[in-house]
Amino acid sequence: MSRRYRRPDKARTRRLLIRYHKHGDQKAREQAIQEQLPLVEFLARKFAGRGEPVEDLVQVASVGLIKAVDRFDVDRNIEFSTYATPNILGEIKRYFRDKGWAMRVPRGLQELRQSAKEAIRNGTVRTGHSPTIQELAVSLDSDIESVAEALTLGRAYNTASLDAPVSQDDREGDTIMDLQADENSPIDGLEDKILLQKAIDNLKGQQQTILKLRFNEGKTQTEIAQTIGVSQMHVSRLLRRAIEDLRGQLGELDDEEDSSNGSLGEYPGERADELKNKA
């Protein structure tokens, strides 16, 4: 199919837009939109083959055209198609950006993620090394928590099927669904909970408090800092140390289970290894 389209008469388009913006002529507005639809279809077809029906893309692009018609400044010496094209393309790109996320993510975080990616790329080229989270937060005029959250949003872009195999090497093996806990079984996962609780009980009081606030109550590092009266940076160090100590405690409990269970010690050891990875 030809990539060309028949351009509307520029002078006529300007006259229609002047009648609309200067005199409130709604009929002139409708005519201007109608005559620019070939441009809409031309730009929409540039995105064909990306998983979305062309008809849907044309509708999205039409929204961009309508916004361009309504926002166009007839006093500026600029051709309408020159002004409308980036508006239409922007509408289509926003559609793909929102449509592409498997989970609904706030627009602000999506934009922060994009800005962070650009800052990382530019910073790496300029300095020869990737900027730290703290440096990104400063350059983006944001806080560390928001930047870190934005950078992890890639996990929300695609999701895995519950029927997908856990191992790509064993297509007939366990699926993700097979490994999910049965909510109707109160026994399932009990060993994990007991082993994890023993490890937590062996930690210092402050470490137990931080882990509870972070993972039980879901508080951010900033909120934890306000709760216990220290800086957010100090909370980050304390949390990292608490997790390291928790892994160490799980390892010691693993050894104790192995020695006390003799030949049957392999199973508890495997469970402890799994819990250490989760920690």
Image (tube, helix red, strand yellow):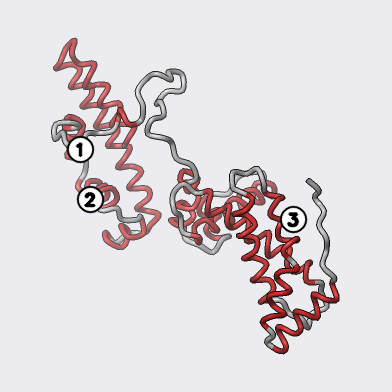
Q: Position of residue 32 (x, y in %)?
A: 73, 73
Horizontally, residue 132 falls left or right of residue 82, namely left
Where residue 42 is drawn, which disc sits there?
3
Packing grade of label 1 (10 A; few <14, some 14-19, many >=20) is few
Say whether marks 2 and 3 touch (CB < 8 Å).
no
Q: CA distance from mark 3 to mark 1?
A: 52 Å
Q: Secondary structure at mark 2?
A: helix
Residue 270 position (above or below residue 151): above
* Relative image position of residue 140 (x, y in whole percent): 56, 61
- Identify the secondary structure beneath mark 3: helix
- Amino acid carrying label 2: it is Thr
Q: Residue at x 38, y 30 (%)?
A: 163
CA gap, disc 2 to disc 1? 28 Å
Res 25 quadrant in image: bottom right
- What's under tag 3, amino acid-wise? Phe
- Mark 3 or 1: in front is 3
Query: Which residue reaches farthest top?
Result: 263
Q: Is residue 246 above or below residue 130?
A: above
Q: Residue at x 29, y 50 (%)?
A: 214
Q: Amino acid at mark 1?
A: Glu
Task: Single out the mark in the foreground, 2 or 3.
Answer: 3
- In the image, taking residue 118 as reference, residue 210 lies left or right, namely left
Percent position of residue 3, x then y: 80, 50
| Residue under numbered circle 2 | 209
Tell me the residue at 34%/56% (across/down): 220
Q: Earlier in the sequence, mark 3 or mark 1?
A: 3
Q: Nearer the viewer, residue 232 or 74?
A: 74
User: What label does residue 183 carry, if any?
Assistant: 1
Which quarter of the figure is the C terminus placed in? top left
Q: Earlier in the sequence, mark 2 or mark 1?
A: 1
